[in-house]
């Protein structure tokens, strides 16, 4: 019964880590990454569609993204959405492909991005702590319902805390790696 709770807790905390990794992939660190375009939706015949479903996205150079739409008539819509996004990049096209040139990040912009990454890390930690609280509530309910002893309760709470500490450390490691990636010139 408790093992199921531990596994459920680990699974929920793993989702918080996966979500953090997904969010961090949208922060550009001076290099072009097709994942930066994942959040940008383009109106395609009345349906919001991700750019990667409208054409090929490639990275021919470290600081260049090339979008080759399958339908050239969608190019203006893609450009409009890129300009509206928080990427801060002006697209250029030759009628067939859209080029996004990523400039070198300034020191100030790098520090801002590190703050954003740290904020995402804190949100992940809050989510993990929320899972811990829910698990501890379930343990207390088990004590009431099925008569767990006081020792079993303490042991279970300690195990949940160990799991939480492991996941918090993972978040710290992920953020540290992303920080290093962002600050790298």
Image (cartoon, rainbow, N blue to C red):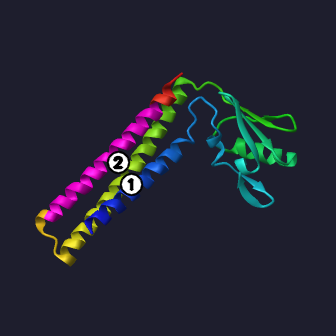
**Residue 13 numbered mark, or none:** 1
Cα distance between the residues tagged 1 and 2: 7 Å
Is 157 in the magenta? yes
The location of residue 113, given as percent across then percent down, is 51, 35
Query: Residue shown at 46%/36% (left/top)?
Result: 115
The number of callouts visible is 2
Q: Mark 2 points at which residue?
A: 167
> Could you tell whether 73 is left or right of 103 in the image?
right
> Could you tell whether 52 is left or right of 161 in the image?
right
The location of residue 26, given as percent across then percent down, is 57, 42
The location of residue 40, given as percent across then percent down, is 67, 48
Query: Residue shown at 40%/58% (left/top)?
Result: 11
Quadrant occupied by the N terminus: bottom left
For this rendering, which residue is in front, 60 or 106?
60
Magenta span: chief secondary structure: helix
Mark 2 Cα within 10 Å, few/some/many (few <14, many 20+)? many
The boundaries of the magenta stretch are 152-179
**Residue 183 numbered mark, or none:** none
Marks 1 & 2, CB-CB < 8 Å contact: yes
Mark 1 Cα within 10 Å, few/some/many (few <14, many 20+)? many
Q: In which quarter of the image is residue 134?
A: bottom left
For this rendering, which residue is in front, 176 or 111?
176
The location of residue 152, given as percent across then percent down, is 15, 64
Q: In which quarter of the image is residue 139?
A: bottom left
Q: Which residue lies furthest to the bottom in this view?
A: 145
Q: Is residue 159 above or below residue 149?
A: above
Q: Is residue 92 above or below residue 45?
A: above
Mark nearer the N terminus (1 vs 2): 1
- Under circle 2, the secondary element is helix
For this rendering, which residue is in front, 109 or 157?
157
Query: Residue shown at 61%/24% (left/top)?
Result: 104
């Amino acid at each position: 019964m408790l093992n199921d709770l531990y596994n459920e807790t680990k699974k929920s905390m793993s989702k918080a880590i996966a979500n953090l990794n997904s969010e961090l992939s949208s922060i550009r660190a001076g290099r072009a990454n097709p994942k930066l375009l994942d959040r940008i939706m383009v109106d395609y015949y009345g349906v919001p569609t991700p750019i990667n479903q409208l054409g090929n996205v490639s990275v021919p150079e470290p600081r260049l993204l090339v979008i080759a739409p399958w339908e050239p008539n969608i190019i203006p819509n893609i450009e409009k959405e890129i300009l509206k996004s928080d990427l801060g990049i002006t697209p250029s096209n030759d009628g067939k492909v859209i080029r996004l040139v990523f400039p070198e990040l300034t020191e100030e912009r790098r520090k801002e991005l590190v703050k954003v990454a740290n904020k995402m890390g804190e949100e992940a930690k809050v989510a993990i702590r929320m899972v811990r609280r829910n698990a501890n509530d379930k343990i207390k309910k088990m004590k009431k319902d099925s008569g767990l002893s006081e020792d079993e309760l303490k042991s279970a709470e300690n195990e949940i805390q160990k799991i939480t500490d492991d996941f918090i450390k993972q978040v710290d490691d992920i953020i540290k790696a992303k920080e290093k990636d962002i600050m790298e010139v």
